Image (spheres, rainbow, N blue to C red):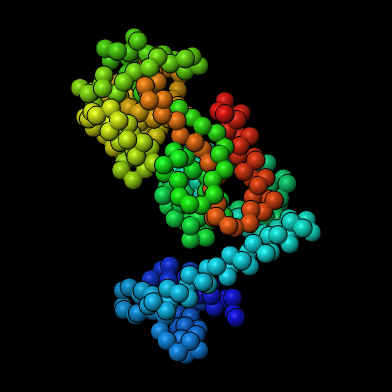
Amino acid sequence: MDLKQLEYMIKIAEENNITKAADKLFVTQSALNQQLLKLERELETQLFVRSRSNWHLTKAGEIYVENAKKILRIKKDTYNQINDLIDIKKGKLIIGLTPERGPEMFAAIYPLFYKKYPNIKIEPMEMSVKQQQAGISRGNLDIGFLTLQDFQKTNDEYIHICSEEIIIAVPESHPLAYLGGSLGEQLPQMSLKCFTNDAFAIMQRGSTLREIYDQLLVEEDCNLPILLETKSGHNLYKMVEEGICCSVFPITYAQQSNKVSYFSIIQNPVWGVHASYKKGSYLSRAAKDLIKIATDYWLKRGFS
């Protein structure tokens, strides 16, 4: 079996277009098409339904691509196990990072990893938690670094790194601000029901933080007016600091400021920072060390 041919078919399936797949594979469209036709003659069936704008797998194609991914994963796991056995520190890790905090973490931990594994290439990819979970499930990511609660986990493997509290932030002008606390001290608890007349900045739908926020509202049986929806946790804090609205976000985004007061939420919501990888796959020594370095990074920031 030609392993390169497996990679070719997977790429066509991912791109739903042979021209785009050829570009990504750095081969000509003609050469890629010849490989596909050769394979279909061998199997005596079509693997793709062709159209000008959208190729999609036939039933036979679905079976082929699904098992092609398994074969390539077995190959990768085999090589990683042998490399660990004979202590060859080379290879490649494709990792997922959430926007904002992910790149900050990577910039801090990569120099430490590089000193130990200079011949292992890391390809970081900024992706949402759900995109990472899909990439891990498909075998496209070796490790995902993500934040979520247990109800948001998939069937893949999760290594808990640390936990962080999700809190309420209100501007100094808010009538309840005087009851709030500052970072570094035990925050007073408050129900979200106390803020039903206040505008809130929250994360956009589809994010894991938004799912947690929506669940809190269901538990409290209340609605909060939405002023702004954003993809940026830093924007949430900034809106509060500017006195525009209130917000709910993980304590990591909070800053020490006399312009913002903080409250714990009565449900004590906490989400975990995790490293995730495909269930049943082999986690190499280098991957484990990367996770250990990431864990140290978070612990030094005061999380547990």
Horizontally, residue 85 falls left or right of residue 282, namely: right
Q: Pick whichever, 217 or 290, lies toward us.
A: 217
Quarter of the figure that contains the C terminus:
top right
The quadrant holding residue 251 is top left
Q: Residue at 62%, 43% (x, y): give it.
A: 291
Q: Pick whichever, 233 or 210, lies toward us.
A: 210
**Above-or-below relation of 67 to 261:** below
Q: Residue at 45%, 40% (x, y): give it.
A: 150
- Where does residue 4 sit, x and y in percent of width and height? 57, 76
Q: Residue furthest top?
A: 178
- Where does residue 50 sit, x and y in percent of width and height? 34, 80
**Above-or-below relation of 99 to 259:** below
Q: Residue at 44%, 38% (x, y): give it.
A: 149
The quadrant holding residue 299 is top right
Q: Is residue 200 visible?
A: no
Q: Is residue 172 visible?
A: yes
- Where does residue 114 sit, x and y in percent of width and height? 68, 47
**Above-or-below relation of 182 to 66:** above
- Where does residue 10 sit, x and y in percent of width and height? 48, 71
Horizontally, residue 8 falls left or right of residue 77, namely: left
Q: Residue at 39%, 34% (x, y): give it.
A: 233
